[in-house]
């Protein structure tokens, strides 16, 4: 065992003892370890938090939001500083054998590389946090690129660790990657596809945080809460989380409701099926009867009515006038009431307009109010909505069913005996 400089300094303390060399070696080792612990505690608890508090005062809102990441960086920086001091003072402090020295130095170098990778990861995370505070960050997310940088960083750290263990140059390790390229592509297939997809998503602004997307093949219908390198997390409206491979947003198709959210309204497209047997021409008496129930002149321009006019024509024009005067309908966007192709369930009348309030609950309530009103005024125009028989009977029909007539048929003839 080779004596170190620190051991020689403390050797006079133990000259009178029989195992002076052993005690001096243990003392030197204890001093070295204690010094490292003191440096770590001072750096981790006093120096770096003090610097962080001063910097945070410059911008409490922006820098304060990065406090968790800065704290993590402080802890990793303190560990890195201790590793550097450990390796720099090893030969002068720790009296061990050559084999033990080789092992301990190798462990110190590996830990230093790992800490270095974590520091770069923290710096990248802080840079991403600063970027996310910018106004256009929601339109151009870079979470996928941040994860790629971290992945490359740890791959380089892994190569350096292997090179230290094998005592070979990193270029020697890299030269062997060509032989395992196929395996590497297979293992990192999703990562490579996700990286390319992340670039396309960021460049074309396909998806960003907070977008409402709908991916039917994965059962996703909700808000994007995370855009990662490999996966995109969607919080559905029932508060479940759906995970989608990032590359599927580029390879497949999905619906992004951002356009609706940024537009002037949310579309209402509902229809009523009218019983075609209730459609008829309107005479003067029936027209007067409708006017007594509803002031048609408030909703319909009489000069534009054809002669003769049908009760369905009046209803369509009334419905369109009602929608135009509704305070919660955006009249600057398309608004119309039209007839669709008739079929065996009646004649569909479609109401097409846009709600000014795009929030889900308000939107659904508005749809219900419009349909309730239009269904309620149908009988005033002499129209009936078409609906299939529900299986319910009137009182007279129920009475007949309760007392059915029984008729015996195919009775056997009586025997002549």
Image (tube, grey):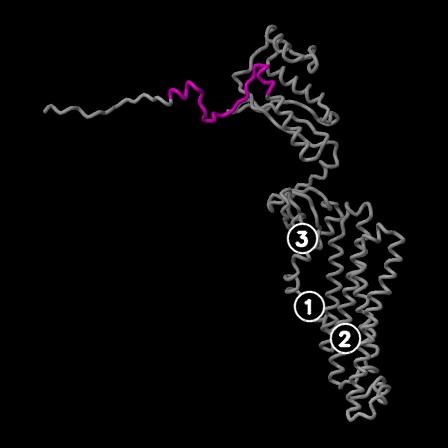
Is residue 138 shown left or right of residue 412? right
First reached walking from the N terminus: tag 2 or tag 1: 2
Cβ–Cβ below 8 Å for labels 3 and 1? no
Instruction: Give the number of callouts.
Output: 3
Q: Is residue 168 above or below residue 236?
A: below
Quarter that holds the N terminus: bottom right
Q: Which of the labelled discs sits on residue 231, or is there none?
A: 3
Percent across and percent down for residue 93 are: 82, 82
Query: What is the secondary structure assignment of the residue under circle 1?
Result: helix
Mark 2, residue position: 108
Q: Is residue 101 above or below residue 222?
A: below
Q: 13 or 117, which lies in front? A: 13
Q: Estimate the x, y position of residue 346 in percent, counting from the top left.
A: 53, 22
Q: How far is the residue under mark 3 from the one under mark 2?
A: 35 Å
- Mark 2 or mark 1, whichever is nearer to me: 2
Q: Quadrant of residue 311?
A: top right
Q: Which residues are magenta?
A: 376-400
Q: Residues within 10 Å of mark 2 (few under 14, many from 20)?
A: some
Query: Outermost residue toward the top?
Result: 285
Please state which of residues 254 and 319 is positioned toward the viewer in this rendering: 319
Identify the residue shown where x is 75% and y is 73%. Answer: 110
Where disc 3 sits, the SS reads strand
> Mark 1 sits on what residue?
178
Mark 2 → mark 1, Cα distance in angstroms: 30 Å
| Residue 393 within the magenta-colored segment of the rendering | yes
Q: Among all residues in the image, which is located at the extreme left? A: 417
Could you tell me residue 22's position as x and y percent?
77, 88
Left or right of 209, for residue 44: right
Q: Is residue 136 magenta?
A: no
Callout 1 environment at 10 Å: few (<14), some (14 to 19), or many (20+)? Answer: few
Q: CA distance from mark 3 to mark 1?
A: 28 Å
Is residue 2 positioned above or below 187 on the image?
A: below
């Amino acid at each position: 065992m080779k004596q170190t400089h620190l051991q020689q300094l403390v050797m006079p303390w133990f000259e009178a003892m029989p195992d002076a060399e052993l005690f001096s070696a243990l003392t030197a080792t204890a001093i070295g370890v204690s010094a490292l612990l003191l440096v770590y505690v001072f750096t981790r608890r006093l120096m770096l938090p003090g610097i962080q508090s001063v910097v945070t005062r410059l911008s409490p809102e922006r820098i304060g939001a990065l406090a968790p990441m800065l704290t993590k960086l402080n802890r990793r920086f303190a560990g890195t500083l201790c590793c550097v001091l450990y390796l720099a003072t090893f030969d002068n402090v720790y009296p061990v054998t050559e084999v033990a020295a080789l092992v301990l130095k190798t462990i110190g170098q590996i830990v230093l590389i790992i800490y270095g990778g974590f520091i770069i990861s923290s710096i990248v995370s802080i840079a991403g946090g600063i970027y996310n505070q910018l106004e256009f960050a929601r339109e151009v997310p870079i979470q996928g690129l941040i994860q790629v940088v971290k992945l490359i960083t740890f791959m380089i750290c892994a190569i350096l660790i292997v090179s230290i263990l094998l005592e070979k140059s990193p270029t020697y390790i890299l030269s062997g990657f060509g032989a395992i390229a196929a395996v590497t592509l297979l293992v990192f297939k999703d990562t490579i596809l996700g990286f390319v997809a992340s670039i396309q998503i960021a460049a074309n602004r396909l998806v960003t945080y907070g977008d409402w997307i709908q991916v039917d093949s994965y059962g996703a219908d909700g808000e994007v809460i995370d855009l990662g390198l490999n996966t995109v997390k969607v919080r559905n409206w029932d508060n479940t989380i759906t995970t989608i491979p990032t590359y599927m947003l580029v390879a497949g198709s999905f619906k992004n409701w951002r356009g609706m959210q940024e537009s002037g309204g949310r579309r209402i497209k509902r229809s009523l099926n009218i019983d075609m047997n209730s459609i008829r021409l309107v005479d003067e008496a029936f027209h007067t009867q409708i006017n007594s129930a509803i002031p048609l002149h408030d909703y319909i321009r009489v000069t534009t009515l054809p002669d003769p006019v049908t009760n369905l024509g009046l209803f369509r024009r009334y419905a369109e006038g009602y929608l135009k005067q509704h305070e919660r309908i955006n009249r600057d966007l398309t608004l119309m009431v039209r007839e669709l192709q008739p079929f065996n369930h009646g004649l569909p009348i479609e109401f097409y307009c846009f709600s000014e309030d795009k929030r889900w609950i308000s939107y659904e309530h508005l749809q219900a109010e419009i349909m309730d009103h239009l269904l309620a005024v149908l009988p005033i125009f002499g129209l009936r909505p078409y609906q299939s028989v529900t299986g319910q009977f009137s009182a007279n029909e129920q009475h007949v069913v309760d007392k059915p007539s029984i008729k015996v048929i195919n009775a056997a003839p009586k025997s002549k005996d």
